[in-house]
Image: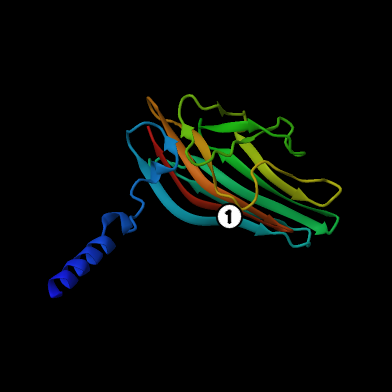
Amino acid sequence: MQTLSIFLLSIIINACSSPDDIPKAESNPFSYIEAGSTLNAYSKTVNDTIGIEVLLTSQVFSDSRSYDLDNDGKDDINFLCIGGGSDENTWGMNTHITLLDSNEIVVTECNPPWNRDSLSPFSLTKGSDISSQSYFKQKSKSTYGFAFTADGSNGSGNCWGNEDYKFIGIKIKKEDSYAYAWIKLALKTEDKNLEIIIDSFGSRE
């Protein structure tokens, strides 16, 4: 009886300590997005919030942040939230992404009221591939808007979605090659509050 009890206890212990039951840390940041090939892999978790609250005081409010996506000591992209207004009928908020140097971004057709050429960053989802086959684009000013909120007379537009993490794809020009990068972010808009929440980013050639 004692032998049987020890045997059963051994089975229970082994079952509870099975490697499949032990949570594993995320060791590969590229497991949810495929960027580039295999060279010079780099990633960083930042958990940054870029945001504004519009107060109706005729002031312009803004917040911005730049990121070095491939860890070469040079920023590759800038995010900007900007807005302002004087009363309930005349206020607005906008987001901008500015590419630095000769970098390019994966874009999509979108028709927000403030963006006449209709190009905005394409919201890539988990499992997407960012490579030379992606539809990259660079405008002369290299600036893209992807969400706008205003009073009823001016309308609003959102090419991204609200409070849902997605990815932006970037192609970075290197000296004699390209690096392909991703940025994981969510957009949150509520009344006169606007936030871009940057979770992480990474790149590889």
Q: In this view, does 82 lie above or below 99?
A: below
Q: Position of residue 121 (x, y in %)?
A: 60, 37
Is 45 displayed left or right of 137 in the figure? left
Q: Where is residue 123 in the image (x, y as percent from the top left)?
A: 58, 39
- Mark 1 lies on a secondary structure that is strand
Q: Can residue 34 be seen in this view?
A: yes
- Graded by Cα atoms within 10 Å as few (under 14), some (14 to 19) or many (20 or more), the crowding at tag 1 reads some
Q: Residue at x 62, y 28 (%)?
A: 140
Q: Which residue is drawn at 78% across and 61% down?
A: 56
In the rendered image, which quarter contains the N terminus?
A: bottom left
- The one nearer the camera, 19 or 40, is 19
Tag 1 residue: 50
Amino acid bearing label 1: Ile
- The tally of labels here is 1
Q: Is residue 73 visible?
A: no
Colouring style? rainbow
Q: In this view, does 38 lie above or below 200?
A: above
Q: Which residue is drawn at 30% across and 54% down?
A: 20
